[in-house]
Image: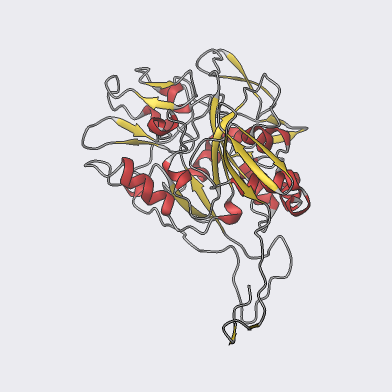
Amino acid sequence: MPEVYNWQLGRNMEYQYEQNRPKRQVAYVFDPNKCIACQTCTISCKQTWTWGSGQEYMLWNNVETKPYGFFPTGWDVMLQSLMGEGEWANGVYEGQTVFEAAPEGERVAGWLPDDRDWAYPNLGEDEPLGIAGQGTHIPDTPHDMWFYYMPRICNHCTYPGCLAACPRQAIYKREEDGIVLVDQDRCRGYQECTKACPYKKVFFNTNTRVSEKCIACYPKVEEGIQPQCVVSCIGRIRMMGYITPADEAPDPNNPLDYLIRVRQVALPLYPQAGTEPNVYYIPPVHVDPSFTTQMFGPGVEDAIKTYQSTKTDERLLGLFMLFGSTERILHSFDVRDGIAYGYDEKGEEVVNVPLEEPTFIRDYFDTVHENYILNVT
C-alpha cells in the first residue's frame, strides 16, 4: 500500500492511492462555543438537497449534543474501538489509522450502521455530563457539568475513507477544490463507502439504490458563494474558504490558513482516523480538555488559550467578526483602524465590519419634544 504524508498526524501513513493533493482545498471552521443547536443549518441543507424519496433519513448536516449525542448512533464510539488505543507524542500520532487498522482483505476499518442507528438524530440532545442538584452553581472553567453542540457535515477529507474503499472508483475528489463527490452512474450501491467513512457522512438512498453525500454546495462555491449551511447560520459560527496545501507555507492573510495553521485555534475532528479532514473546530472552552483532546487532538488547551485571548487580539477578533458577515467566499482579510475587511479572489473588498458597534447616548429628557426617553442608547 502506498505511503502518503498526513500533516495532522505529523507522519507518513498507509493509504490506498498515491498522494495527489488538489490545487486548493475547500475547508471550514466551526465554532461550537457559539452554536445554540437551532438546527437552521440542518433544515436549510435538507430543504435544498435531501427532500426527495429515499432521502428521508439523510442529514448531510446535523447538530448533535456531546457527550451523549450521535448520528448515527454511536458513530464515534465505534470509530475509536476500531482503531484501538493510540498516543500522541510531540505532535506525532503513534497509533493506527482506519487504513492501517483495516483487517486482512479490507481497505479500511469500518462498520455499517443498521436502520435503527439512523432513527434517532436527536439522541442525547441537551443531556449534560453530571447531575445538577438543588442550588448547583458552576463558577469555574472548565465546568464540572457540561454539554456542547457539535455541528457536522462531510469533511471533504484529503484522504477520504469512502474513496479508498469504493471498489467501483465511483467516488472522486475534485482537482480544482478538493470537494469529494459520488459519481452516481458508476455507483452500484455496495455501501462500502458508508462502511468506511469514519464520520458516517455517506448515505445510501433506499429508492435509487446508490450512495449520496454532502456536495459542499459546489454550484454555489463555483460562483464564489459559501455553502447553504454556512450562510444560513444565525449564530455566525461558520466560515468556509480554502486552505493552502500542507507542503506550502500558510498565508497569514488567508482566513482559513490564519485560523488553522498560523494561530492553530481551529482543530480537525478525530485526526487520528487518518483521513486528514478539512472541517476544523474551535474547542469549547467550558469542557474538560481530556474529552475534547480525544476528539480534536493534542492542541486543545493551546487553542482554548488563543481563543480566550481574542478580546485583546485585534486581528483575531476582526477575523471572527467576519464570520457570517457575507455570503461571498473570503480569500483574504485585513484588520486596521478598528475595522475588519474581507476580500474576494480578485482582491476586491466585499465586506467590512467594525470591531465595536458604535454607541449613541441620548439625553434622558428630550427638550425638543419635552419627553422623557426611557431607552437612552
Look at the image and tell me whether residue 112 can be seen.
yes
Q: Nearer the viewer, residue 325 or 175?
A: 325
Q: Residue at x 27, y 29 (%)?
A: 210
Q: Nearer the viewer, residue 13 or 233?
A: 233
Q: Quadrant of the N terminus?
A: top right
Image height of 167 relative to 237, above or below: above
Q: Residue at x 55, y 32 (%)?
A: 344
The residue sitting at the front extreme is: 368
Q: Quadrant of residue 366?
A: bottom right
Q: Nearer the viewer, residue 122 or 303?
A: 303
Image height of 308 relative to 135, above or below: above
Image height of 247 relative to 76, above or below: above
Give percent across and percent down for residue 84: 59, 36
Q: Residue at x 65, y 59 (%)?
A: 357
Give percent across and percent down for residue 284: 64, 53
Q: Quadrant of the C terminus?
A: bottom right
Look at the image and tell me whether residue 293 can be seen.
no
- Residue 117 is left or right of residue 350, and the answer is left
Q: How many numbered callouts?
A: 0
Q: Quadrant of residue 188?
A: top left
Colouring mode (rainbow / by chain / secondary structure / one colour) = secondary structure
Image height of 325 relative to 206, above or below: below
Give percent across and percent down for residue 36: 52, 59
Q: Residue at x 54, y 47 (%)?
A: 325
Give percent across and percent down for residue 332: 63, 33
